[in-house]
Amino acid sequence: MTVLVGERASGSKQGSAIAALATRVRDVHALNSTASVLGWDQETMMPEGGVEHRASQLALLAKIAHQTFTASEMKDLVSAAVAETASLPEDHADRVDAREIQRDWQKATLLPESLVTELAELSSKAMHAWAAARKASDFARFRPMLERTVELNRKKAECLGWPKGGEPWDALADHYEPGLTAASVADVFTPLRQRLQRLLDRLKGASRKPSNAFNEHALAIADQERFVRFVAKRIGFDFTRGRLDRSTHPFCGGSHCNDVRMTTRYLETCVLDALGSTMHEVGHGMYEQGLDGTRIGLPMGEAAGLSVHESQSRLWENQVGRSRGFWSWCRGELPAFFGDACDCFSLDQLYEAANVVEPGFIRVEADEGTYNMHVMIRFELERALIKGDLAVKDLPGVWNGMYRDYLGVVVPDDRHGCLQDVHWSMGAIGYFPTYTLGTLLAAQLFEKARKDLAGLDEGIAKGEFAPLLAWLRKNVHAEGRRHRLDGLCRKVTGQPLSADPLMRHLEGKLLPIYGLA
Ligand code: ZN
């Protein structure tokens, strides 16, 4: 069941400055969301032959959207809307819309049209080159595209500028998480890495190891697909307003809250891979579906930022999908999809398989204990690439060295190394830290939901997910872009964003599984 809540339509009167501005911004959103559907099509349906022309289509849409958003009359429209809403309370939806549109507009005006167009065209082509290079496990095939991507992103950072004392990476990260800086990320990541390392060392030394058998149990992909679609619907994804398809790299896109496009992937040997990927993307998808449908295209109808987005996916994937309660419910559902093929697994074995901690190469397959180490490596590398401290040609070697240092694993080839993620090919630099910040927020939100919702865990064990989704709808989804990451965290939990809830979550779960508590 999906419950749409949120402030009703804006109250902005026809003929008002904010209404006139909203009309223009909705045009820009219509163009951008068209590009988003074409992007989804490129990853899921488009034949190989479509690559060149798709890049031109996306470049043209980016150009027209940029022209529309930065047209000369916009300056007056933005100023008038900001002035008109200035006497409203700070958190009033119209005032938030005016504030956020002004922010987006100011940034857009700093970017030349030629750069916007070239970046859109390059990312479409680079994603294709990345996929081919990844398949062949050959970094050299992707290298020229990545060099150009880094070069154009440096230019973009210079156009946007960054706060005094900061660095170019900050300008790029601000697009994904307003106000995020490399220094503030390092302040969070450095102590977190030490705490995670201590936990991983303890788990490594444990004499008890969790059962891994369910991770190596082959199940037919057609059955897996029916099963993950069932779970997606049961936890709250509305299939009348969204789709689930397949792609190499699972993602959630689409055009607006009533047309959400998610993808997942399947491995015959491990249903947990498809289940984890699906629950993750469903978390993103339900956030999108929970945004205010009366404000499509306006900031109050958009997600707060990528960290908050990631908190929603990580919460459903981990706090719910890797909990004992979830498996207690899920075990009873398995025969409907897999017959007696899973009967040999006890609840303990299923729960433990979902929580095995084992350092590996691939971020999207990583367990909860090691996941953030993968993110930290990417943050340091992209920061160095943008600063000019690391040349693209040296990336594979440095990448592999960091995997040895952070996770103690020897990367066998580029496919399992620096070619595994789609992000840099999309030009998404400054994005990765939002995964870890979102992971911290997920743990903090779930602790608060447990306090607010009596019997939350018992309900999950019975397959009742609606109370949690309704809580997230009210506290997070309906807020649109009203708050920044830390502001939202304080408002909902009463505390600033902290690593303590995540460490409590990990230690509270993993130490008993490993016989250490
Ligand atoms: Zn995600």
Image (cartoon, rainbow, N blue to C red):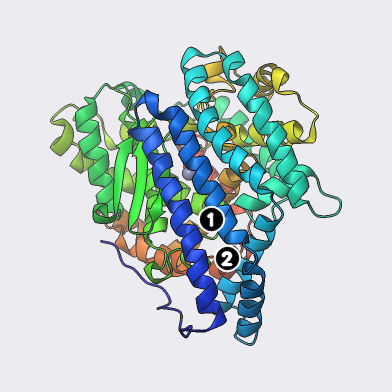
Using the image, determine if residue 263 lies above or below residue 401: below
Taking depth in this image into account, of 358 and 372 the one nearest to the observer is 372
User: Ligand 1 closer than 8 Å to the CB at disc 2?
Assistant: no
Using the image, determine if residue 514 lies above or below residue 309: above
**Who's the residue at 80% across and 45% down the image?**
167
Q: Which residue is mark 2?
A: 488
**Which quadrant would residue 374 be assigned to in this image?**
top right
User: Tag 2: Cα neighbours inside 10 Å, few (<14), some, or many (≥20)?
Assistant: many
Secondary element type, mark 1: helix
Q: Amino acid at mark 2?
A: Leu
**Who's the residue at 33% across and 48% down the image?**
325
Taking depth in this image into account, of 146 and 516 the one nearest to the observer is 146
Number of numbered tags placed on the structure image:
2
Q: Which residue is mark 1?
A: 308
Quarter of the image where the N terminus is located: bottom left
Q: At which x and y percent is residue 305?
A: 56, 56
> Are circles 1 and 2 on residues that touch, CB within 8 Å?
yes
Q: At which x and y percent is residue 514?
A: 48, 32
User: Ligand 1 closer than 8 Å to the CB at disc 1?
Assistant: no
Q: At which x and y percent is residue 483?
A: 59, 67
Q: Amino acid at mark 1?
A: Val
